[in-house]
Image (tube, rainbow, N blue to C red):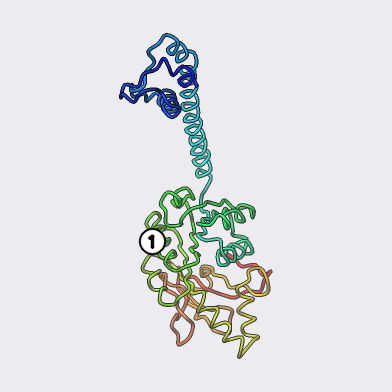
Amino acid sequence: MACWLGRSGYVDQTGGGGISLLDAFYYATVSITTTGYGDIVPVSDTARLLNTVIVTPARVLFLILLVGTTLEVLASHSRFLWRLRRYQRKLHDHAIVCGYGVKGRSAIDYLRGSGEAGEIVVIDTEKEAVDPAAADGHTAILGSGFDREVLRAAGIEQAATVLVAPENDDAAVLNTLRARELNPKVRLVASCREEDNADLLKESGADSVIVSAEAAGRLIGLASRTPHSANVINDLLKSGTGLDLLERPVRAAEVGIVPDRSETFVAVIRGGKLLGLTAGEAGALREGDRVVFVKANGEVADEL
């Protein structure tokens, strides 16, 4: 405004003639932002006075706003990092769930039903999934499960379990690789839709792989022929109701005993390998073995 009102006192060093309205806006912009190029300058006393009274205070105000905004952003970021580090110090032996879709929510429901949920951190790429996860009482992070910084924000180094349950198998493989890279000791369970990708997930570092589409298809086929058997399997998959499928260490009194299929034992885990009870594959129980067994809900299972 000062430049336009006092345009007769300004000169365009480029030889452009008089000062137009566009020239006035240009001069005001480069003056306030302190980037003045010296092409348009005040030469009369009146123009210089208006520049001193109007433009200079506007320039100072602009700088104050710029510096203030920058400091506010830096302070907000610092507060966020402080709260994040404070929260991360509290995380220990927690579970990280990558994907809050049907599979992720079902896995969390099972953990809650078994009483072993503890602290749960949810990671998802969709805000429509993160908001419900936060509303359900979980710590929810918007981001990719194969992003190093996102996993570190979720406390991957201190996590006890990582459940990989994204919507597609490509993301499952990348999530598994990154989680295993950042925590070689974490228990890592991944899900995939296609059977062909199960071996790839195991090679990527997954301890266990669940093929959701294949498992559902087999259960549907079983239900079509023996519906009651399918109901039993469904019962086993629902923690806290009817029958539960659990795992525990072998007791001292059981060492040397050959598990009988008439008992509640289902399988034996020896040296990290799952052994069935058919054809004497497991043989006699040994010290350090773990047994997979079925119990009725409400019974006490020692040393789970």
Residue depicted at 61% across the width and 83% down the height: 230
Q: Residue at x 50, y 62 (%)?
A: 163
Tell me: residue 69, above or below residue 138: above
* Residue 137 pos. (x, y %): 63, 52
What secondary structure is found at the residue carrying circle 1?
helix
Q: How many labels were placed on the picture?
A: 1
Residue 303 x/y as whole percent: 56, 64
The one nearer the camera, 57 or 93, is 57
Which residue is depicted at the point 44% across and 58% down? 186
Location of residue 71 in the rendering, given as x and y in whole percent from the top left corner: 48, 29
**x then y, percent, for residue 285:** 47, 76
Which of the pair 79/275 is nearer the observer?
79
Q: Residue at x 48, y 69 (%)?
A: 191
Badge 1 is on which residue? Answer: 177
State left or right for residue 118 relative to residue 177: right
Quadrant where the C terminus is found in the figure: bottom right
Q: Is residue 47 above or below residue 92?
A: above
Amino acid carrying mark 1 in the image: Leu
Which residue is nearer to you in this view: 176 or 42?
A: 42
